[in-house]
Amino acid sequence: MRLRLALAALVAVSLAPRPAAAQDEVFQITPYVWGIGIDGSFKPLRNRPQEIRFSEGLSDVLDDLDSALFLSAFYRNGRFVALGDYSRSRSSRDGRIPLLRLPVEAQVRQSALTLSAGYRALDGEQAKLDVLAGLRRWDIEARVSTTVPGVGGLSRGLSADFTDPILAARTSLQLSERLSLLGYVDAGGFGVGSEVTIQALATVNWRMTDALFLSAGYRHLHVDYEDDGREIDFSFSGPLLGISLKF
């Protein structure tokens, strides 16, 4: 619901009547594919040192991914800029506990909605720089389940939803008429929601037409969250490929 409202707001702004001189107004939407690898751990029980670790590379995720949705949007009017990004994925893996040979299933589900707005501090022909502030809303669940003969199912997990303030910077470099580089980084948390959250993104972009762009790059998203002795420390990383539609 939050995603629909956020995207509806961005679309509404982009479709609003424009003054004849407002040629500096841009709206861009980008569905993308993210080969999201997972690395990290969670501690589901308060005051217990035991951690459950996850580590999945891209090849593992391609086998274990159950569902995924990735979408971003960008709006600019003069020097005002706004960004929105939504990512959601769920993966699971079956295996066996060593020695005991008991069946086990591990699941990780995450969704992150990032909204920010700011100012175009540098607007040159070859280089541009945006500085922004905003929020990232997290919803994360990690769980491990097994079945013990004569006992039944056992499960240990942790779920959390919280909102982090973030500070961000976005830069683009024009390499040629059709080729450009884009870099983005944000950091936040500050103990408000999580202890720390960091995101970094870099893409190479090819302008196919005036309204269509193809992007390829790499994205890293990290969160370290603690609540009353329970902890989540995950990194989501991998290559991405997207198509941007410019209005």
Image (cartoon, helix red, strand yellow):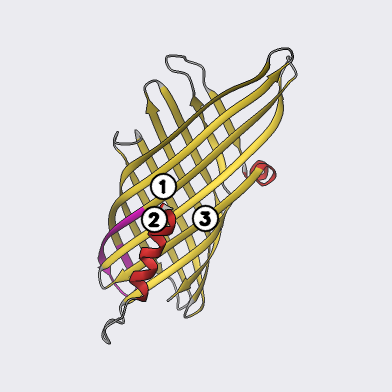
Q: Residue at x 41, y 33 (%)?
A: 224
Looking at the rendered structure, which numbered label has been put on residue 184? Answer: 2
**Residue that protrudes farthest toward the bottom in the picture:** 20
Secondary element at tag 2 = strand
In percent of width and height, residue 200 lies at: 42, 49
For the point 52% across and 55% down, which residue is it?
70
Range shown magenta? 115-129
User: Do we see residue 172 in this rendering?
Assistant: no
To which residue does mark 1 refer? 199
Q: Report which residue position mark 3 lands on.
A: 70
Whether residue 115 is situated above or below residue 104 in the rendered picture: below
Q: Amino acid at mark 1?
A: Gln
Identify the main secondary structure in magenta: strand
Judge whether 53 appears above or below 49 on screen. Answer: below
- Frontmost residue, 2 versus 77: 2
| Residue 202 in the image, given as x and y percentages of width and height | 46, 56
Mark count: 3
Query: Is residue 75 magenta-colored?
Result: no
Q: Quadrant of residue 97?
A: top right
Q: CA distance from mark 2 to mark 3?
A: 16 Å
